[in-house]
Amino acid sequence: MSAREKIILAAMELFWLKGYNSTSVADLLSRTQLNSGSLYHVFPSKQDVLIGVLEAYRDGIHAQLLAPAWAAVDDPIEKIFALMRHYRTLIVETDCAYGCPIGSLALELHEPDPQVRELLAANFENWTSAIEQCLADADRRLPPQADRRALAQFVLTAMEGGVMQARTHRDVTYFDRAIAQLRAHFDLLENAARVRA
Amino acid sequence: MSAREKIILAAMELFWLKGYNSTSVADLLSRTQLNSGSLYHVFPSKQDVLIGVLEAYRDGIHAQLLAPAWAAVDDPIEKIFALMRHYRTLIVETDCAYGCPIGSLALELHEPDPQVRELLAANFENWTSAIEQCLADADRRLPPQADRRALAQFVLTAMEGGVMQARTHRDVTYFDRAIAQLRAHFDLLENAARVRA
DNA sequence: TAGTTGTTTGAATGATCAATCAAGGGAAAG
DNA sequence: CTTTCCCTTGATTGATCATTCAAACAACTA
């Protein structure tokens, strides 16, 4: 494994656990058993490590996140809720300390570089595009006038908001209630599409 | 104005602008024109300033947030969307850099003190309780089986998720779409209640 | 063998951090 | 005037921060 890969892997974990500002370069060095010169040979600055991490999340969304969550699910709308169950598992496994790596960084970095901000946005964009594809695959089950893109973004909204509250209250039922509301919303939409048909 | 009040006011603004970790004690001192000894005479540590800030938000939610947002609104459900418009104004006024002060702190602080975590939770709790009261005031317009508390939490979910995306994309329409979805959800609920009645 | 290129070493640098504390100021009480 | 009490001053401390760089090393090439 190259030094670059080692650093990216360690940074993905540490930024997620402690945040970007609270992760020191020394933390990355001790975790990877590298020396500072090696790190700075690969990355000009700590921010470039962050950029590498955000690129890794962006490029790995299907292999690392969606494929595992959708391994046994075919129905497009159930795929959405399977992804939510995946996040629920992460919340439970971390004793409700889980935070979405992208969402946490998006709120932690108050004056991000344009490049960093665009990568955060690209990560959200990739995520919602995948949901939008699910909605496209379920086309006839939704009212024709329903805005697919807005609905996909709303799924992200519900996930991020639910994760934030579950983490703050250290209680996964806050996430569960957010997802239950989202499910109710989809049920109402599917009902409306059926009635009209 | 007492030293304590000066510090709390400055800290509310700086924590909101830069985050907790990125706000140094030196920042607070230069903003307040105080010396470090004065600050540490009032607050044993920087974290105690944070606690003071969170208590101020908790205690000021009605006077500082809800009363202004609801000045000209009576209808309980419109109160909810008036509050959302209030947040929209904040987003626009800050060129889409706005972040909910509580939500940002909740995601920035990865291993918060129990006291800090409880104050974050209390802030969310106060907020959702106010929404829950609106829902109680609109009782007959909602289906009787609809879970009021879950719905109130979902309003917070939509707001936080919408703010996060608007900020990340630097585009208020992401917030607008989240609120439009929330409005659609309420419309569907009100419709369901009407049909059944 | 000698030279070239790419990589690693790790001590050092200067900035910045939160926090300390002995000394002094000033107002009220005796 | 003297004592007491609360508050302020601001230089100082030691830790930690991101980053640098001359020197050493390793793997090829001529």
Image (cartoon, coloured by chain):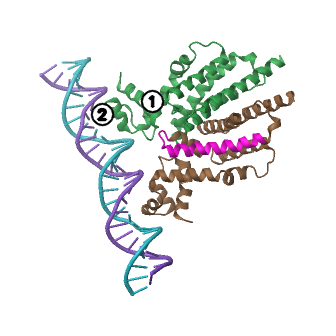
Chain colours: A brown, B green, C cyan, D purple
Q: In this view of the protein, which residue sits in the foreground, A8 or B55?
A: A8
Q: In this image, B78 relative to D14: left or right?
A: right
Q: Chain of mark 2?
A: B
Upstream in the sequence, badge 1 or badge 2?
Answer: 1
Mark 1 highlights which residue?
Answer: B12
For residue A81, say whether it is visible: no
Residue A110 image point, x, y percent: 48, 39
The mark found on residue A169 in the picture is none
Q: What span is in magenta? A: A109-136
Q: Label 1 amino acid? A: Met
Question: Where does label 2 land, which residue?
Answer: B35
Which element is circle 1 on? helix
Look at the image and tell me in which quarter the C terminus of chain A lies.
top right
Label 1 marks a residue whose chain is: B
Residue B100 rendering spot, x and y as whole percentages: 54, 31
Q: Is residue A131 magenta?
A: yes
Secondary element at image label 2: loop
Q: Main secondary structure of the magenta part?
A: helix
- A41 up-or-down from C3: above or below: above
Residue sitting at 66 percent across and 44 percent down?
A127
Question: How dense is the environment of label 1, judged by Cα within 10 Å: few (below 14), some, or many (20 and up)?
Answer: many
Q: CA distance from mark 1 to mark 2?
A: 18 Å
Q: Which quadrant is the N terminus of chain A positioned in?
A: bottom right
Do the dots labelled 1 and 2 sit on one chain? yes
Q: Residues within 10 Å of mark 2 (few under 14, many from 20)?
A: few
Identify which residue is drawn at 37% across, 36% down. B27
Q: Amino acid at mark 2?
A: Asn
Image quarter of residue B192: top right
